């Protein structure tokens, strides 16, 4: 508030330091990916690896679309998430690695406003999912642009 010293003359102090950037919690993450079991077209909150395994299954290798067994990237990512101190993980299961299925799963994650990080573990690495990796990465990027305040982790 300005201090009036005389009619028409006043002094206004303004801070010269930049305001600090406020931190935002990054402990809530959203994963999309295939699992052994669990709900499809629904994002479910899990708070431990044991709860993840009860809902989505164990680390056993997956057999997608009758193909050769493949690593269960979603389980491995969930294990690492909780081991590194993560507390809240939303999981949206997809039946297979198709960009179309991943866009539906990302829509399920939109309702959870507290998510700050999204990922599709194992989906975007190389060309191992029938060329769908780039499309899935693009779907993740479109999701974070639309949702703002989120960022995507992509496999390199």
Image (cartoon, rainbow, N blue to C red):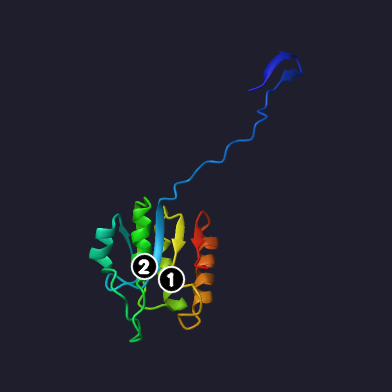
Q: Are marks 2 and 1 in contact (CB under 8 Å)?
A: yes
- Vertical placement of 53 versus 65: above or below? above
Location of residue 139 in the rendering, given as x and y in whole percent from the top left corner: 51, 70
Residue that appears at 50% across and 43% down: 23
Residue 77 falls in image quadrant: bottom left
Which mark is on residue 74? 2
Residue that appears at 33% across and 87% down: 66
Q: Nearer the viewer, residue 115 or 33?
A: 33
For disc 1, the neighbor class at 10 Å (few under 14, some 14 to 19, many from 20) is many
Q: Secondary structure at mark 1?
A: loop
Kindly identify which residue carries mark 1.
122
Which mark is on residue 148? none
Location of residue 75 in the rendering, given as x and y in whole percent from the top left corner: 33, 66
The residue furthest bottom is 66
- Vertical placement of 134 versus 21: above or below? below
- The span from disc 2 to disc 1 (Cα, nearest Å) is 7 Å
The first of marks 2 and 1 along the sequence is 2
- Vertical placement of 146 versus 99: above or below? above
Residue that appears at 75% across and 14% down: 7
Q: Nearer the viewer, residue 79 or 22?
A: 79
- Relative to residue 10, is residue 116 drawn left or right? left
The residue furthest right is 8
For disc 2, the neighbor class at 10 Å (few under 14, some 14 to 19, many from 20) is many
Q: Nearer the viewer, residue 63 or 92?
A: 63
């Amino acid at each position: 508030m300005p201090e009036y010293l005389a009619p028409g003359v006043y002094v206004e102090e303004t801070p010269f330091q930049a305001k600090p950037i406020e931190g935002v919690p990054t402990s809530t993450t959203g994963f999309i990916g295939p699992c052994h079991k669990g709900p499809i077209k629904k994002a479910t909150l899990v708070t431990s690896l044991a709860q993840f395994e009860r809902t989505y299954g164990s680390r056993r290798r997956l057999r997608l679309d009758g193909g050769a067994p493949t690593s269960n990237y979603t389980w491995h990512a969930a294990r690492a998430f909780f081991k590194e101190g993560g507390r809240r993980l939303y999981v949206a299961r997809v039946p297979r690695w198709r960009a179309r299925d991943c866009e539906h799963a990302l829509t399920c994650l939109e309702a959870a406003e507290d998510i700050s990080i999204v990922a599709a573990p194992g989906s975007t690495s190389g060309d191992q999912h029938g060329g769908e990796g780039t499309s899935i990465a693009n779907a993740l990027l479109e999701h974070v642009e639309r949702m703002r305040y989120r960022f995507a982790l992509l496999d390199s």
